[in-house]
Amino acid sequence: MSDTQNAQRAPDAARASCILALANQKGGVGKTTTAINLAAGLAEHGLSVLLIDLDPQGNASTGLGIGYDARRQGTYALLMDDVPMADLSQDTEIPGLRIVAADTELAGAELELVMADRREFRLRDALSRAGSGFDVILIDCPPSLGLLTLNALVASDGVIVPLQCEFFALEGISQLVRTVDRVRRAFNSDLHVAGIVLTMYDRRNNLSELVAADARSFFGEQVMETLIPRNIRISEAQSHGRSVMAYDSRSSGAMAYQALADEVIARNSLKTPGKKKARA
Ligand code: ADP
Ligand code: MG
């Protein structure tokens, strides 16, 4: 990576007001869960939100009720072909939330990108070309620091890092923070850590408290105030293809993700038109 590559940047006139990647190279830490429920929480505030499923596993797509049968062209076409966004994004059950689903070809994208022209900028270019029309774009990354995640980091204003409250959680995160620094220097001077979110917090478990305290002493203000508790309603909701707010609005998980949406709005100075009554 070198600074000369900055010159390759495409004009960004049509970017969304805020693009945030959910990234952590560890799997199972709550990236997808946070992407889905944060997106839903932001949409409930009346923001128009796009979720891009950049993980070939497609859990964000399934978790929002878009099964394999319902998927048309999605993220692969966005990265590799010149398909307009209008043809790629689809409605979800949540008003104000659209998704670009993970299509089956996405599994091959990591390899194909190696040979592609402007390989680190494919997503950024596509989002600039597509025009935004969205207030917020969230990108759910795969569990690796390969070219797919790199594309997300180059296209984003900020990174939200879900951190699972368990042993070794902090080990991987310094590698991620170093990657964010390198991407900022080489490709995207705007990029910053928009927040570290502590997930699957279990108040009955001392380890959760220790990890949370360690994270706060090490990363300070970068750690979001909102703690996401371990709550079975969160994973149940996902298996029903719904946000936890839609599934059980009184659960601790729903309240936590609503609070996280409030905090993301405040931290990123997002302008909300006022809260929508999105739930039945
Ligand atoms: P990642 O996208 O980082 O791989 P996921 O969001 O898919 O991680 O979460 C991994 C698993 O943990 C999923 O089965 C999900 O339903 C579950 N899970 C995530 N967050 C919570 C939580 N706060 N409480 C209970 N289960 C959770
Ligand atoms: Mg995931």
Image (spheres, rainbow, N blue to C red):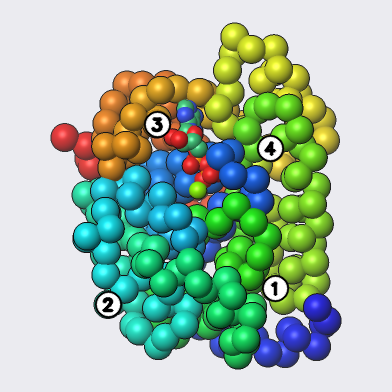
Marking on residue 223 = 4
- Amino acid type for the residue under numbered disc 2: Asp
Q: Secondary structure at mark 1?
A: loop
Give neighbour class at mark 1: few <14, some 14-19, many 20+ (Cα, 10 Å).
many
User: Which badge, 4 or 3, is on the more N-terminal residue?
Assistant: 4
Instruction: Look at the image and tell me in which quarter the N terminus lies.
Output: bottom right
Report the Cα–Cα distance between label 4 and label 1: 22 Å
Q: Which residue is mark 1?
A: 188
Amino acid under disc 1: Asn
Viewer-nearest of discs 4 and 3:
3
Earlier sequence position, callout 3 versus callout 1? 1
| Beta carbon of the mark 3 residue lies under 8 A of ligand 1 | yes
Q: Position of residue 161 (x, y in %)?
A: 63, 46
Instruction: Find numbered disc 3 in the image and state the secondary structure of the residue it sits on.
Output: helix
**Residue at image point 52% right, 63% down:** 19
Question: Who's the residue at 58% across and 23% down the image?
Answer: 201
Q: Amino acid at mark 3?
A: Ser
Numbered circle sitting on residue 87: 2
Residue closest to the eye, 228 or 60: 60
Give the image location of residue 182, x and y in percent.
Answer: 80, 66
Residue 235 image label: 3
Mark in the foreground, 2 or 1: 2
> Looking at the image, is mark 4 or mark 1 earlier in the sequence?
1
Amino acid carrying mark 4 in the image: Val
